[in-house]
Amino acid sequence: GPTEFTGVLLNDLLAEAGVQSGATTLTLTASDGYTYDLELAVIQECSDCMITFAGEAGDYMCAIPGQSGKAWVKGLVSIEVK
């Protein structure tokens, strides 16, 4: 069912980081080595996508409404824009 998350909006984070022009892909990497690629445009059009805390360990997670569960990377350790 519906779940509420608290965190940082992914677009705010990307704006603060200064995404290079011409970038097209966002790669999310988990602590276990799992990676997931998304089109940057999909994220830029998502006003609710965020980096949030998950679980009792305080791990980071990507919450990406409207995308496959595979995009909801748990144990997030890096975000790369290329």
Image (spheres, rainbow, N blue to C red):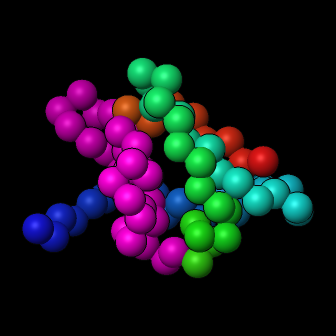
Q: Is residue 47 magenta?
A: yes
Q: Is residue 82 magenta?
A: no
Q: Position of residue 21 (x, y in %)?
A: 88, 62
Query: In the rendered image, which quarter is residue 11 located in?
Result: bottom right
From the viewer's perspective, is 68 left or right of 27? Answer: left
The magenta stretch is 46-74
From the viewer's perspective, is 19 left or right of 71? Answer: right
Residue that appears at 70% across and 54% down:
25
61 versus 24 height, above or below: above
From the viewer's perspective, is 28 left or right of 56? Answer: right
Q: Residue furthest right?
A: 21
Residue that appears at 15% across and 70% down:
2
The answer, for residue 69, to whether it is visible in the render is yes
Query: In the rendered image, which quarter is residue 40 located in?
Result: bottom right
The N terminus, quarter of image: bottom left
Q: Position of residue 62 (x, y in %)?
A: 42, 50
Residue that appears at 53% across and 43% down:
36
Residue that appears at 42% across and 21% down:
32
